[in-house]
Amino acid sequence: MVFIAPLLPFVGASLLYFFLPDMARLGWINGVGQLLLFTLVVCIPAWRTGRLSYVDIGWPLGLALIGLVALSFAQGVGWRRLIIGLVYLFMGLRMGLAALRMWHAGHFKTEFPRYQYQHLRWERKGITKVRLMIQVEALVQGFANISFLAFPAFVIATNRSEQVHALEVAGLLLWLAAFATESLADAQKLAFLREMKRQNQTRRVCNVGLWRYSRHPNYFAEWMVWNALVVAAIPAWLDHHGRSPLAAWALLGIGILYVSRIMYTTLVHYTGARPAEHFSVQKRPEYKAYQQATNMFFPGPTRDPG
């Protein structure tokens, strides 16, 4: 059961496409594509090497695939299909191409720390069939791209209303602001690390710019990127009312809202903040004081660590 339970919510959500006529074709084209992509890019390399890090290539390329499917096969209003398709393409290719560059540079020869932390979780749970568990985790990511993470794209791309809803505008503006914030946080940390390397002080804690108000402003901004997509998808979900069975329509709405929960859990507990801090505390003597003075995820004022 330990190998099946993680997959059940995502596989179950994928079955919704059977009951959503406007999205069924998109769902199953994307589903076949995601399974093929993850088999070749994640599952086979992970089985051969025993490393889960290949998810960092497969997952974002899967987002790009969602964008391509929305652009190519959706039957909604053209400008919506174009915007949401390009948004997913941009998000996916930005991260996916960066991961491919890291792979080409040889950085995938060792397991990334966030996935080392996952190995520690399995060890604490007494899971010994690690290679099998790696395959399960890879498939969870693949089915997330088939189901929940594709729902905002496909529901927006199949919206038939010609009218622009205020929530669509708000969602797009929030997405732009969140992406700009994430990019700024990444740039500030990169500049800090370069300066510390120049000074030969690589164990210093980055607490400049946005990093003064959150220990992980990049992860918070990435969460807000997905919240923006949820907001933008609400009018499209309302437009689908009456074109699908009521229960399927209601479950689709829950699934769209659940994207926020999935990304929060991922960015805080699964591959984000907590795994990063597990190793930062060990490597950086000042990190405990930083934890006492600065919020972990949600930005806020600094506190006196004493």
Image (spheres, rainbow, N blue to C red):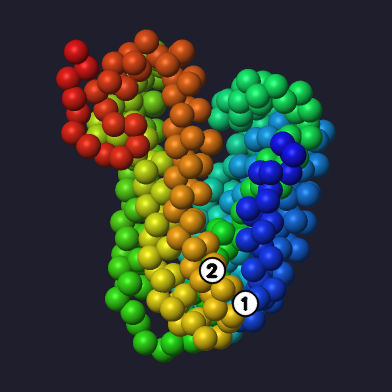
- Closer to the N terminus: mark 1 or mark 2? 1
Going by the picture, which residue comes out furthest to the front? Answer: 247
- How many discs mark residues in the rendered view? 2
Q: Position of residue 228 (x, y in %)?
A: 38, 60
Give the left or right position of residue 265, taking residue 115 as reference.
left
**Front in this rendered view, residue 61 or 14:** 14
Residue at label 1? 20
Residue 252, numbered circle: 2
Going by the picture, which residue comes out furthest to the bottom? Answer: 162
Quarter of the image for the C terminus: give it.
Answer: top left
Quarter of the image for the N terminus: give it.
Answer: top right
Residue 205, numbered circle: none
Give how far apart the Cα atoms at labels 1 and 2 are: 9 Å
Give the left or right position of residue 133, taking residue 21 as reference.
right
Residue 88 can be seen in this image: no
Quadrant in the rendering for residue 286: top left
Query: Is 71 situated above or below 109?
Result: below
Query: Is 122 situated above or below 177?
Result: above
Q: Residues within 10 Å of mark 1 (few under 14, many from 20)?
A: some
Q: Position of residue 297 (x, y in %)?
A: 35, 37
Label 1: element kind? loop
Query: Is 17 situated above or below 123?
Result: below
Residue at figure coordinates x 35%, y 17% from the top left: 287
Name the kind of residue labelled 2 in the image: Leu
Residue 59 can be seen in this image: yes
Residue at figure coordinates x 78%, y 31% from the top left: 131
**Front in this rendered view, residue 125 or 200:** 125
Label 2: element kind? helix
Q: Residues within 10 Å of mark 2 (few under 14, many from 20)?
A: many
Residue at figure coordinates x 34%, y 16% from the top left: 288
